[in-house]
Image (cartoon, rainbow, N blue to C red):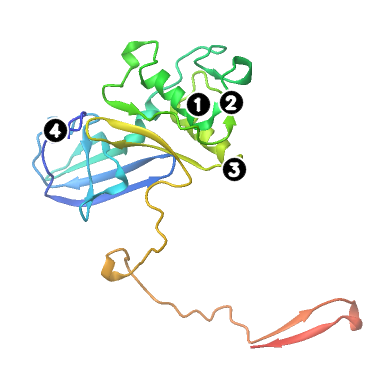
C-alpha cells in the first residue's frame, strides 16, 4: 500500500516472513520475496499488510524502513504503525502547558487523557506548528478517563517513551493500560484500552493440526528424579528430627 493505505499490489512470491509485536512496544517485520516489484512501490513508509487465515496479522500495517535488492529477490525491513510515535518528540519548552501535565499547572488527569493530550498536541489538531498535524492521516480516540490520575513532565521526550511511561505509572497504581495505532477505514486510529487488547480468549489450543506448533516433541526427563527424600526438621545434631518420605 502507499503511505495512505491505498493498495498497490499483492506480493505472491514471498518466501520468508518474520514479524513480531509486543504490548506498548514498537514491533518489527522482515519480508523476503521473489516478485519483480517496481522499487517505487517500496518507498519510505509505504505499508505492507500481512494476512494469516484471512486475518490481519497483529492488527497492524508494517511501514517500510529499509529495502534491499538481492540478485533475484527483495528484502524489506519494517516497523509497525506504533513506530510513528517514536518519530515524534514533545517539541515544547519546559514550564508550558504543552509539556507539563502536572499539579502545578492544573493539568493532572486520568492516564489515558494525558496520553491523548500529548498525541493531539504533537501529532494532531492541537499542534501549534501546523506542519506537525497528522489528523488527515491519524485519528485520535476521545478521552475515556481510563486509569488513575497522574502527572507527567515531558519536554523534548519521545512520544512513544512518554506514553510507555504513563502506562507503567498507571499499572503501578493498579490499572493496566495498553495503547496502539491500528488501520482504520480511512485513517490510522490511536486508542487506549484497559485490561487487555483484542479478544480475551478463555481457551487457547495448540497442535500440529492448527498449524501453531513447530518441531513438536514429547520429552521424558528423569535427570532430577529422586525416589526417597530425607527431610530435616527442628533440632541439632543427634536431636534433629529427620523424616523419610518415599514415592
Q: CA distance from mark 1 to mark 4?
A: 37 Å
Sequence order check, earlier mark of 3 and 4:
4
Mark closer to the chain start, 2 or 3: 2
Q: Residues within 10 Å of mark 1 (few under 14, many from 20)?
A: many
Residue under the point 59% across and 15% down: 105
The residue to which callout 4 is attached is: 41
Mark 2 / mark 1, whichever is N-terminal: 1
Residue 86 position by quadrant: top left
Mark 4 element type: helix
Quote the CA–CA distance across marks 2 and 4. Answer: 43 Å
Element assignment for label 1: helix
Question: What residue sits right under mark 2 in the picture?
Answer: 151
Q: How many marks?
A: 4
Mark 3 lies on residue: 174
How far is disc 3 from disc 4 in space, using C-alphas? 46 Å
> Are the residues flagged by discs 2 and 1 in contact, CB closer than 8 Å?
yes
Identify the mark nearer the N-term, 2 or 4: 4
Q: Residue 139 in the image: state x and y as whole percent.
A: 32, 27
Q: Nearer the viewer, mark 1 or mark 4?
A: 1
Residue at the image point whose x is 45% and y is 47% from the top: 196
Going from N to C along the chain, the mark reached first, 1 or 4, is 4
Query: Which of the two discs, 3 and 1, labels the residue nearer the N terminus?
Result: 1
Q: Position of residue 113 (x, y in %)?
A: 48, 28
Q: Residue at x 46, y 80 (%)?
A: 220
The quadrant the N terminus occupies is: top left
User: Is label 3 or label 4 in front?
Assistant: 3
Which residue is more in the foreground, 205 or 237? 205
Q: Between 180 and 223, which is closer to the camera in this rendering?
A: 180
Nearest the eye: 95 or 48: 95
Q: Which residue is mark 1?
A: 114
Label 1–label 4 contact, CB within 8 A: no
Measured Cα–Cα span from mark 2 to mark 1: 8 Å
Amino acid at each position: 500500500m502507499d503511505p495512505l493505505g491505498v493498495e498497490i499490489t499483492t506480493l505472491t512470491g514471498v518466501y520468508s516472513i518474520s514479524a513480531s509485536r509486543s504490548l506498548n512496544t514498537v514491533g518489527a517485520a522482515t519480508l523476503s520475496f521473489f516478485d519483480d516489484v517496481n522499487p517505487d512501490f517500496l518507498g519510505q513508509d509505504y505499508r505492507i499488510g500481512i494476512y494469516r487465515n484471512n486475518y490481519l496479522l497483529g492488527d497492524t500495517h508494517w511501514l517500510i524502513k529499509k529495502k534491499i535488492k538481492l540478485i533475484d529477490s527483495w528484502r524489506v525491513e519494517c516497523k509497525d504503525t506504533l513506530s510513528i510515535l517514536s518519530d515524534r518528540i514533545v517539541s515544547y519548552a519546559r514550564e508550558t502547558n504543552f509539556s507539563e501535565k502536572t499539579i502545578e499547572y492544573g493539568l493532572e488527569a486520568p492516564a489515558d487523557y494525558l496520553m491523548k493530550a500529548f498525541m493531539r498536541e504533537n501529532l494532531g489538531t492541537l499542534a501549534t506548528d501546523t506542519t506537525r498535524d497528522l489528523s488527515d492521516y491519524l485519528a485520535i480516540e476521545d478521552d475515556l478517563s481510563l486509569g488513575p490520575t497522574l502527572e507527567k513532565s515531558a519536554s523534548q521526550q519521545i512520544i512513544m517513551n512518554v506514553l510507555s511511561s504513563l502506562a507503567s505509572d498507571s499499572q503501578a497504581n493498579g490499572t493496566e493500560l495498553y495503547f496502539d495505532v491500528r488501520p482504520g477505514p480511512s485513517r490510522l486510529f490511536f486508542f487506549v484500552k484497559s485490561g487487555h487488547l483484542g479478544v480475551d480468549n478463555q481457551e487457547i489450543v495448540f497442535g500440529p493440526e492448527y498449524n501453531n506448533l513447530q518441531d513438536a516433541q514429547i520429552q521424558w526427563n528423569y535427570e532430577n528424579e529422586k525416589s526417597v527424600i530425607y527431610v530435616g526438621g527442628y533440632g541439632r545434631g543427634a536431636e534433629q528430627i529427620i523424616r523419610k518420605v518415599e514415592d
